[in-house]
Image: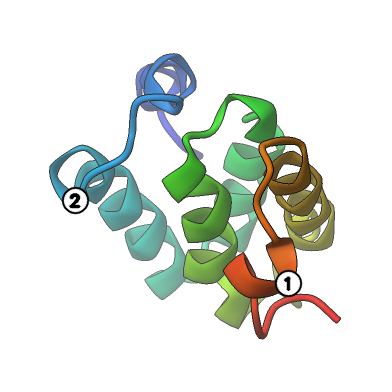
Amino acid sequence: MIPIDVLLKFNEECHLLNDVNSLLPYYKAINYLLFNKRFDCVDEFLKSSDPKNYSDVLLVGIPRLTCQYKKQIKSWKMILEQCKNELIKRGYNPQKSLMGLID
């Protein structure tokens, strides 16, 4: 399980996470969970965050970071679809941004 304080901080800051220094703690935490096969925790984390609040970088970064484990993360397709739709709303081409992840 992801500590509630980490989750709350992510949800408060996710719209600001646009550079390596700000993204690194969260990417490290997600990678740690993936490496330790805590797919349930990653799934919980993804379901509790809203891609509408993600920075542009996170809209691409979260699906890419987790795509290797998409079969083990129940909400992965849902998150990918939400990120794709949000990219469209923001005027980006998801076919380019998420190349290799979407059909």
Quadrant in the picture for residue 36? bottom left
Which residue is found at the position 13% from the left and 43% from the top? Answer: 21
Q: Position of residue 18 (x, y in %)?
A: 31, 40
Q: Nearer the viewer, residue 59 or 67?
A: 59
Q: Nearer the viewer, residue 9 or 72?
A: 9
Identify the secondary structure beneath mark 1: helix
88 over 39 or under it: above or below: above
In the rendered structure, the answer to whether residue 7 lies left or right of residue 76 reads: left
**Nearer the viewer's eye, disc 2 or disc 1?**
1
Coloration mode: rainbow
In the rendered structure, the answer to whether residue 36 lies left or right of residue 62 reads: left
Q: Amino acid at mark 2?
A: Val
Identify the secondary structure beneath mark 2: helix
Q: Which residue is mark 1?
A: 95
Q: Amino acid at mark 1?
A: Gln
Which residue is found at the position 65% from the left and 54% from the top? Answer: 40
Quadrant in the picture for residue 3? top left
Which residue is found at the position 54% from the left and 58% from the top? Answer: 60
Q: Residues within 10 Å of mark 1 (few under 14, many from 20)?
A: some
33 over 54 or under it: above or below: below
Q: Position of residue 93 (x, y in %)?
A: 70, 60
Whole-angstrom CA distance, mark 2 to mark 1, is 24 Å
59 over 33 or under it: above or below: above
Query: In the rendered structure, which disc, 2 or 1, sits on the residue that comes first in sequence?
Result: 2
Q: Which residue is mark 2?
A: 20
